[in-house]
Image: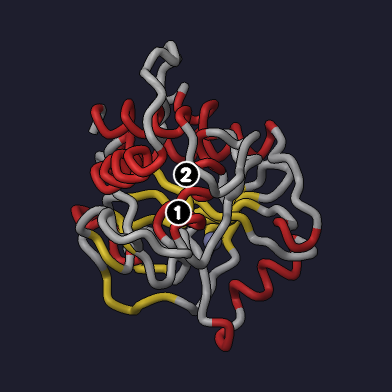
Amino acid sequence: MRKLLELSPNFSKKTRKSSSIKFIIIHYTGMQSEIASIQRLKNKKAKVSCHYLINRKGKIIQMVPENKTAWHAGISRWKTYRNLNINSIGIELVNKGHRFGYEKFNDLQINKLVALCKNIRKKYNIKKNNILGHSDIAPLRKIDPGEKFPWKKLSEYNLGSWYKNFRNDLKQTKTVKIRNLFFKNLFKIGYRYYSVKVPKKSDRFIIRAFQRRYTPKNVTGKLNQKILLISDFLAKSQ
Ligand SMILES: [Zn+2]
């Protein structure tokens, strides 16, 4: 696969074992331009980086070698993992993001991402469900890659989890019960940063992270029957 190099100094110097690589984390750059993004990812003071950046034309730019830990995820959790930088490959997609004019991810960019992820997944034997967005592992701080990211399309290539169509034939569940069941399911799926027993104000960020990924046309931060059913399906397919 053709890759350009724009090496970043922002990575942990210790070489890691390939067996420690278990996740792929997807981001958007969230900056005005591609040039500004690359500059920031190369800036020593910014202390951020990624392994790969894919631009809007589908060019892949490598910034950190895969056997080094890049600094893209920050404080994060998924299942029993904490600080997922250590266990992941980070991929940034050039996109202005919610702050500067969130753009649709185009086919050139997504097709390259699919090819790159397939390649990485095979190389390190990464589980299909371990391809995640930044907002999945840091839902209280991050919203990238956001609701325009085509998770459904990726799942057609066995990248990331998705659900099958189902009939909405569950009896209406009481709201209190929905919360309990939903968050129990999310715990099984891997989400953290909430308590199943004690509702918190910040729960809406977790709900939104889930909705951005699985019901991108309905990101409300409020619980409903549909996301409960989807979470049920996903929890059972772990
Ligand atoms: Zn990110």
In the image, taking residue 80 as reference, residue 143 lies left or right, namely right
| Residue sitting nearer the eye, 58 or 149 | 149
Q: Residue at x 43, y 11 (%)?
A: 167
Q: Secondary structure at mark 1?
A: helix
Q: Quadrant of the C terminus?
A: top left
In the image, taking residue 149 as reference, residue 180 lies left or right, namely left
The part of the image, by quadrant, that contains residue 124 is top left
Quarter of the render that holds ligand 1? bottom right
Look at the picture and state if 11 lies above or below 131: below
Q: Position of residue 133 (x, y in %)?
A: 47, 50
| Residue sitting nearer the eye, 166 or 107 | 166
Disc 1 target residue: 206
User: Is there CB contact under 8 Å for labels 2 and 1?
Assistant: yes
Q: Residue at x 62, y 36 (%)?
A: 218
Q: Residue at x 50, y 55 (%)?
A: 204
Q: Amino acid at mark 2?
A: Phe
In the image, taking residue 150 as reference, residue 78 lies left or right, namely left
Disc 2 target residue: 210
Q: Position of residue 32 (x, y in %)?
A: 79, 64
